[in-house]
Amino acid sequence: MSTAASRRAYRGPALFSFGFRPFYLMGALWSALVVPLWLWSYLAGGPGMLTRDWHVHEMLFGFLAAVIAGFLTTAVPNWTGRMPIIGAPLAQLAGLWLAGRVAMLFQASIGPVAAGVIDSLFLMVFAGVIWREVLAGRNWRNLPVCGLVTALAVGNIAFHLHGVTWASALGERLALGVAILLLALIGGRITPSFTRNWLKARAASAQPAVFGPIDQAALALTGVAVASWALFPDAVFSGALLALAGLANLVRLARWSGWASRAEALVWVLHLGYGWLGLSLLLLGASILDPAIPRTAGIHALTAGAVGVMTLAVMTRSTRGHSGRDLRADAATTAVYVAINAAAVARVAAPFTGLWQQTLLIISAALWILAFAGFAASYGPMLILPRPLRA
C-alpha cells in the first residue's frame, strides 16, 4: 500500500493520522509551559527541580525533539514511499515522548537514573524507526538525517550523566550542533524550494539560485565548525570556523531571493529563520574570539532565533498544507511570526544591556509564550480535527 493509500485507509482519531499532528501540538504546548516555569524558578526561586539544566534539557530534548519527530514522521514516508507511522504506533511513540516529560518534571521523586532511562527511550526508539524506514526505502540521500537524529539521542544520554561534567556539557553541545546542521540541511532545502514555487506561481522574474558549489561549501564548513565546537568549545580555531560558517550561510541565504517573497509571510519567515542561523554562528564564533561578547547571545540567537523561528515556520506551513488549508498566512499566523522574532531579538539583546537584562528576559519569555501558545490556540483545531472535505 502506498503512503497516500495507507493514510486514506486510516480510520482512527485524526490526531494520529499524521506524525506532525501530535508532536507539533505537544511540542508547542510544552514549549509555552517550560519557559514560564524556568523563569519563575530563575527569578523567584520556584521548585528546586526547575534548574537551569532542566530548562536546557526540556527545550532541546523535549520541545525541539518533538518538532523534529513531527517533521520526520511526516516527511520520511514521502521520501521513501513506505507506509507512514500512523495510528497505534504513532500514539505509542508520542506516549514515549510524554513519559519523558513527566519523568523529567518529577525526577526529584523518582531519581535521576530512572528519569534518565525513561527520558532516553523516546529518542532511541525514534532514531531506530527513522533508520529502519530510510534504509528499507533505500533513501541514501537522507542518511545524514538519520545520523543527526542518532547524535541527538546520544547527546541526550550524555546529558543525563550528571556525575560527569564534561559528558553533560558535550551532550548539550551535541544537541545544539544537531539543531544547527538540521537547519542548514533541511532549512537549506525547503527555503529556496518553497520560495521558488511561490515566485513561479506569480511569474516573478526573481528566482532563488539552484543548489551548487556555494551551498556545498557552506554545508561542509558548517559541519566542520560544529564538530570542532562540540569537541573544542573554547579553541580559537573553533571560534574562527563558526564565524566563517555564519558568513557562508548568510551568503547562501542572500542567493535565495528572499526579498522578492516579502508579500507572503509563510515564505519570508523561512528566510528570517535561516538568517538567525547565520547570525547565531557569527555570534558564537565571535564570543570565543572576543570574551567581551557574551556566549549566551550566540546560544540564544540559535535557540530563540533560528530554532524558534524556523520551527514555527515549518509547523505552520506543514499544518496548513497537510490539513487542506491555503498556503497563505492569516493574521494569527503573522502575529505568531512577529512575536517569535521579537522574542529572539529581546533575548539576544538582554546580556548586552546591563540593568535592563532582567526586563528583557521577561519580555522575551512573554513573547515566546505568546508565539507558541498562539500557535497551539490557532492551529490546535487543525491538528486535532479531521481534514475538512473539499467542496
Image: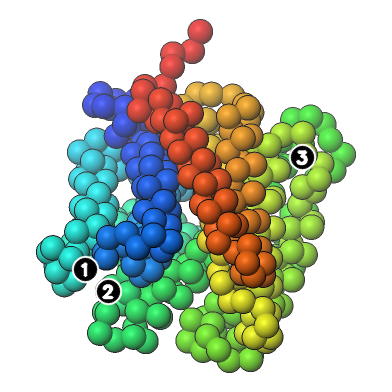
Element marked by disc 3: helix
Q: Position of residue 267 (x, y in %)?
A: 68, 40
* Sequence-wise first label, 1 or 2: 1
Furthest residue in direction top, as rendered: 391
Q: Quadrant of the N terminus?
A: top left
Asked if the residue at tag 3 contacts the one at tag 1, i.e. Cβ–Cβ closer than 8 Å, the answer is: no
**Residue in the picture at 53% in, 41% down:** 371
Is residue 323 among the parts visible in the rendering? Answer: yes
Question: 256 or 132: which is nearer to us?
Answer: 256
> CA gap, disc 2 to disc 3?
43 Å
Q: Residue 87's image quarter?
A: top left
Residue matched to label 1: 116
* Sequence-wise first label, 2 or 3: 2
Residue matched to label 2: 160
> CA gap, disc 1 to disc 2?
6 Å
Q: Position of residue 305 (x, y in %)?
A: 60, 57
Residue matched to label 3: 261
**Residue in the picture at 69% in, 50% down:** 271
> CA gap, disc 1 to disc 3?
44 Å
- From the viewer's perspective, is residue 74 above or below residue 149? above
Q: Position of residue 261 (x, y in %)?
A: 77, 39
